[in-house]
Each structure stands twice: as C-alpha cells, then as structure tokens.
Amino acid sequence: MKRAPHLVVDDRQTIESIQNDFNRLYPFLKLGFFKTPGTKGKGNAKSNMYLSNEKLEFIQKVKKNGLYHLPVNTTVAEIERIFESDFGLYVQVFRKSGNVWLETSATDDWTLEQQNEEGKSLAQHYQIERESAEDHDIY
C-alpha cells in the first residue's frame, strides 16, 4: 500500500526548503508564505509575502515542528488551515497556469491532486515544461 505523501515542518528550515519539498510532491503547485492570513475567496497581497530565504523559526506564530501527512483528498483549504493552526504559518497554494502562478483562493475546495492535475493539463495545453517553485511571477 502506498504511503500518503508528507511534509516535514521544522523551524530550522527555510521557506524555500518547504516550497521545494511541496513542489516535488505536486510539480504544478507551490506554497506562498505570508505575514498575515488571506481573506477567504480573495487570498493575500503580494506585499505580505515572505522571501524564500526566511527561516521558519523567525516567522512561526506557533513554535512547533512535525510531520504533516497529505492524503490524496487533502483540499487547499485544509492544508492552509493546518499550516495556520498547527504551525502558526499563513500559506496560500498557487497553481501554474500557463506562464504564471495563480493563487487558488477561488478553488480552495479542490484537492491538491485536482489542482495539480489542472496545472498539468494547462501546461500540456500551453506546451510548458514543469518549472521550478523558485519562479516568482507577478500574480
């Protein structure tokens, strides 16, 4: 039986480290880390986004480390809620759409797998290769 994908959250990590781990699991998705929580259905302003070299220990509101399992039916809303409640981190999921990363706030009820498949489908439509989570496009 295949184990559910998981992420390790450790305050010694940088944002980039978690972003890379998440992007390996879901190649057409990435996590953005913010200073404040997003507004339901609207997301968050780019001016509130942390830089990828920030260490978690300096931005966590809840000082906790752990292993977070991502069952295939995990929704965007669930992962965002877990990061906030368990780790004190405000995250937003972004999906690759053509040449840009779009915040998935309008489709928070979709699973991570659905979001990733949509990103993959769009990439195939636009004939775009998987890109690195370190790409920082304007959204």
Image (cartoon, rainbow, N blue to C red):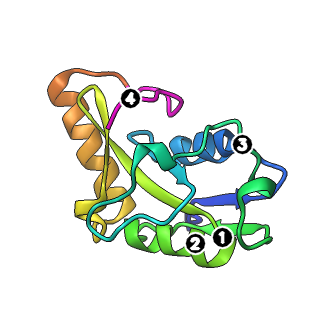
Q: Earlier in the sequence, mark 1 or mark 4?
A: 1
Residue type of the residue flagged with mark 1: Gly
Would residue 96 be visible to someone looking at this image? Answer: yes
Label 4 packing within 10 angstroms: few (<14), some (14-19), many (20+):
few
Span shown in magenta: 130-139
The answer to which image quadrant residue 78 occupies is bottom left
At which x and y percent is residue 63? 80, 71
Q: Secondary structure at mark 3?
A: loop
Q: Are marks 1 and 4 in contact (CB under 8 Å)?
A: no
Which disc, if any, is residue 84? 2
Q: Is residue 39 above or below residue 19?
A: below
Q: Earlier in the sequence, mark 4 or mark 3?
A: 3
Q: Earlier in the sequence, mark 4 or mark 2?
A: 2
Which disc, if any, is residue 137? 4
Residue 126 vs residue 102, the one in the foreground: 102
Q: Is residue 25 above or below residue 133?
A: below
Measuring 73% from the left and 73% from the top, which residue is drawn there? 62
Residue 60 vs residue 13, the one in the foreground: 60
How many marks are shown on the rendered structure?
4
Instruction: Find the residue positioned furthest to the left.
Output: 125
Instruction: Find the residue positioned furthest to the right.
Output: 12
What residue is pinned by disc 3?
A: 54
At which x and y percent is residue 45? 39, 50
Residue type of the residue flagged with mark 4: Asp
Q: Earlier in the sequence, mark 1 or mark 3?
A: 3
Residue type of the residue flagged with mark 3: Glu
Residue type of the residue flagged with mark 2: Glu
Q: Secondary structure at mark 2?
A: helix
